Image: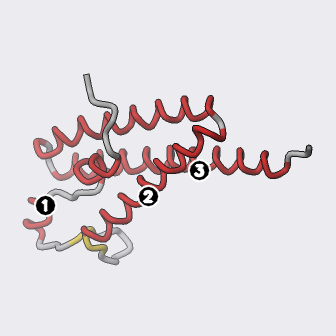
Amino acid sequence: MVNTSLNAGQVQSTAVSSPSASSSVDSGRTGLEPQNGSTVQHSDKYKTDSEKLEQCQSQLEALKVMSPAQYTRLRSSFDYLMNGAAQYANLRQKTNADTQDTVDALYRYRANLLCAQIAQTLLDGLTRRGEARP
């Protein structure tokens, strides 16, 4: 059984945002190099991704008060995603660089999608409360 009380930052640092050390050394790169040609330093990218996940967790916790039913559903999805990322983190170094890039992108996409759903649900709830008439 996988521990569901994982800190999103812990999972993020090991599974989603850390590029392969061997591919960075072999290619001479010092950071992540997106297709648009700009270079993002690893520590800056980690900080951004980690901060996004922390914000996502905060918004999720706000849903506990705003919409308990939605909170339960989204919390389950968040925990499932973080558990999968933690399992991947344990296997990541045993895969090649192409697989790492692909699965890293998959988890980044899934986290971004879920966090967007959480943010939208919170915004909808706040809007409904703001528009409510006595």
Q: Which mark identifies residue 119?
A: 3
CA gap, disc 2 to disc 3? 11 Å
Give the vertical position of 47 relative to 59 (above or below).
below
Q: Which residue is drawn at 31% across and 71% down?
A: 44
* Amino acid marked by disc 3: Ala
Locate residue 64 relative to residue 12 in the image: left or right: right
The answer to which quarter of the image holds residue 68 is: top right
Q: Which residue is drawn at 55% across and 50% down?
A: 116
Locate residue 11 relative to residue 124 in the image: left or right: left
* Amino acid marked by disc 1: Ser
Q: How busy is the neighbourhood of tag 2: few (under 14 within 10 Å), some, or many (20 plus)? A: some
Reading the image, the residue beneath label 2 is 52
Q: Earlier in the sequence, mark 1 or mark 2?
A: 1
Q: Residue at x 62, y 29 (%)?
A: 69
* Amino acid marked by disc 2: Lys
Is the C terminus in the top left, top right, bottom left or bottom right quadrant? top right
Q: How busy is the neighbourhood of tag 3: few (under 14 within 10 Å), some, or many (20 plus)? A: some
